[in-house]
Amino acid sequence: MWRNERYESVPLDVKGIDEDNSKGTRDSLHPQTLRKTRQSEERPKDSNLWPYFQDGLRRIDYVLTYHVQKPHSARKQKSRSCCLSRGRNRTSSPARDDPELAAQEQRLDYHEDDMRLRRDEFEENLREMGLEIEKEEGTKIPGVGFVKIHAPWEVLCREAEFMKLKMPTIKKYEVSHGSGITEKVNMFMQKVTAPLQPKVVDSRTENEKHLSYAFSREKRHLFDLSDRNSFFNSKTRSSIVYEILKRTKCTRAKYVMGISSLLGSGVYTDAYPLHDGDIDGELAETNDRKILCEEWASYSIFYKYQPIGLIRKYFGEKVGLYFAWLGVYTQMLIPAAVVGVIVFLYGCATVDDNIPSNEICDERNNITMCPMCDRACSYWKLVTACGTARASHLFDNAATVFFAIFMALWATMFMEHWKRRQMRLNYVWDMTGFEDTESHPRAEYEFHVMKKSLKKEQSPKAGNVKLTCTDRMPAYMTIIVMMIFLIFVTLVIVFGVVLYRVSIMTALHMSSTPTFRTNIRATVKTTGAVINLIIIIIMDEVYGAIARWLTIMEVPKTDKSFEERLIFKTFILKFANAFTPIVYLAFFRGRLIGRPGKYIYVLGSYRMEECAHAGCLMELCIQLCITMLGKQLIQNNLFEIGVPKLKKLLRRRKIDKKHQEELNKTLHRHEKDHFLGPFVGLNPEYMEMIIQFGMVTLFVASFPLAPLFALLNNIIEIRLDAKKFVTELRRPIAVRAKDIGIWYTLLRGLSKVAVIVNAFVISFTSDFIPRLVYQYMYSPDGTLHGFVNHTLSYFNVSHFQPGTEPLQPLHLGYRVDVCRYKDYRDPPWSDTPYEFSREFWAILAARFAFVIVFQNVVMLMSDFVDWLIPDIPKDISVQIHKERNLIVELFMKEERGKKHRNTIGDPSPQPLRSRPSSQA
């Protein structure tokens, strides 16, 4: 938005500033009258400890940094010395300076002068908007210049009115906490959870609340302006200045530029608001940052609730909503983890009574199985799969179906609980009527609009020029083709891991070392899962960079649109990257293999891998376990701890170590924050949790301990993120938000897909349906006795294809004429040898019937729970209605007061004015 469209001019006593161009100095202060007023209101602060200008009175609301080039004479002297040193090493040196080097110096000088002129124009425009500026160049940090920005009171009031910021009024009202029973329950819960509450002021429920209203300069009397320094807190001040920075233009370039483009083109290197103060040291005074460090960013208080109100006050609503959502998600994982552990313990307790696993482990059955690979593998005894069968029962038992239904309802309860929590936070944070009407176009969008307008020979300011679908069609086609190609790459990678498992299994069977021949299946499963994990971690970074590149190519208009499109692309790619190996193990492995004598081969001689006799559920569990633990320990926690510390160490290496300790004591707040890592947004944090949510819900039927692992990770994750936000990162720009945006839609979609996926896992991956069909249709005594024999088919070894029979047919010490394999096929002596039997089709029908019934019943129950629980808590709905009535009463009282004052001031009766008649 242009400066003169909807903004009033700033008085001269607010914006009259002269710049001092000397290095390490500041701009002139306010006129004497304003200076005396401020000195009478507060004492000067120490600028070394607090974020203030050198006068100690004006607060630093925002900081811009830029690169300070060395003086021309120093560069020239350095370049000459370089030429002389190179000349000594050569046999013939030119008598004059290198012309290429001179041209390079000239280009550098021109580029630096252009940068400086852009900065001067931009800063002059900021002054015209009413901001005050103080500059420092190379005082303590060599090569870095600082532009410190302060927003005076009138500018804050003007921008707060334009941004429609809700501020607390003088009016207070009593907050009711529901009906009598509800209030007693709330009071009881507060007493019980008192030891778990952080020791901050706003962690408890207040009985009184200020009535909030959008700030207006005409209605200043409604607000408590007794302390102007605290009316707008540091978070609000920095967000106001950032809005001005986005709107202010620099026209020295070929097209108009805001702060985003200036940062992108290198005119400024960084832009950030400042932290409130230090968090350690003898001179560190109490501030919000220090309180957050003590009561939030500490591993010793992992059992306490988060101070969500203080987090929102310091970092803004968007960051506050993320940590509130993460806290609700972690709390809801507690019952899920408890039930998952109970299901796992039930499997442990009943493993000795499980009839199928006992039959597999019974050596008296003497069942000979067909080879697992061609030539190198020989016949083997089913009893050798005893350990795998018993381990599979831990995750594949009667309680698995119950747990899958429970987790589907849990996901619905979690979503409903979060909606109610979010609505409560909106009421407490005065965000109930907030509407995100972002109107600032991104700099890249303006640049493309400018190029399009120049092609049409129109003015760059023409309002009718915009990017259409036709303009974006090449980008759309590129995005579609690229996304399909990347998903195909993911499938190829999974296929490559499959080939690794097949080849390594054959190689281990051919090995002459007894150590390698033992536990072949466990070795192949574990190494394959580790390789998948490494590939997932690497490709996550690659897909994230490609998704950003594709989004930039799309040229979204606003930052919100850019963020949503980036999130969607990143989610699709990372979701496919993380879950494609798991989907293969759950639904494809062991189903596209053929049968003995007629196996399916890929790439000529590679036979598709089979599942163990107990099914692929155990391998799926191993893959989920290694992926969850690996991503949480390596990608999330290790990277989040190690990478920021490494970057911080590299930034500090630029300063001499001898003077580093002394320098830290004398650095100002804006200089200390310069060494902190830049804030890159919440998308990586959300993406990490969304992928984890998918691990917890999508395949939970095969891994009941997933909620427990997620709970343990999140307990650490909350404090790790807190420590990172408070101590390792620069303070983010406070962004207003009333919900978590597109992330809620993704969560909702995952919870729906989880019902279908778990239905297929129970039906097709586990042996739950075959056991059920056998027990009630084929068992002679109604038990599972004889189930293992029922699942095995017969194969005549003379029907092996030439070149595929075992090299050592007498490996077991006797001649094998018939071997067994897991499938439902007719025996070789039947009229239809090796064709699917009637049992196969009966079980297949039962599988699909279970999927349909399970899906509809669980979704119906989920929808019923969704309908039963209201999105808005009743007490919050009452309070919102009460606030609206109080606002109406407040304005009616104000109108009556105006009329009363007008009547007293002018008691003479006013003549009635006749309504003008309309002219024909």
Image (cartoon, grey):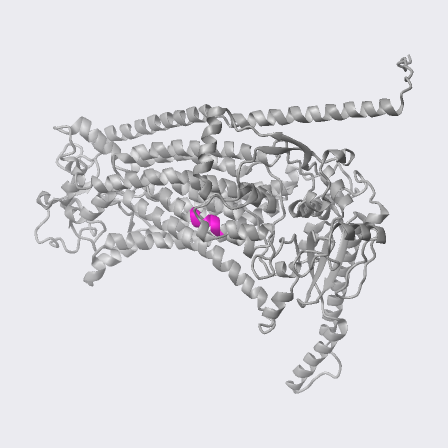
Q: Which residues are magenta?
A: 714-720
| 394 and 421: which is toward the camera | 421
Whole-percent x and y of residue 297? 50, 52
Give the number of marks. 0
| 823 and 382: which is toward the camera | 382
Tell me, yes or no, whether the highlighted magenta stretch contains residue 719. yes
Residue 445 visible here: no
From the viewer's side, name the closer residue of 208 and 429. 208
The secondary structure that dominates the magenta segment is: helix
Q: Which quarter of the figure has residue 425? A: top right
Position of residue 77 measured from the top left corner of the image (x, y, whole percent): 73, 78
Give left or right: position of 695 versus 43: left
Give x and y (percent) for residue 626. 35, 50
Q: Is residue 409 visible?
A: yes
Q: Is residue 763 left or right of residue 115?
A: left
Residue in the image at 51% along x and 26% along y: 178
Residue pictured at 53% horizontal, 27% vertical: 875
| Figure quadrant of the N terminus | top right
- Please state the horizontal and vertical placement of residue 804, each as a whole percent of the image: 21, 51
Please report the residue visible at 55 percent of the width from the left and 56 percent of the height from the top: 727
Q: Is residue 872 left or right of residue 140?
A: left
In the rendered image, the quadrant that contains the C terminus is: top right
In the image, residue 530 sits, relative to residue 693, either above or below, namely: below
Q: Using residue 901 as the reference point, say whether residue 615 is left or right of it.
A: left
Q: Nearer the viewer, residue 909 or 669?
A: 909
Q: Is residue 399 magenta?
A: no
Q: Is residue 202 above or below residue 720?
A: above
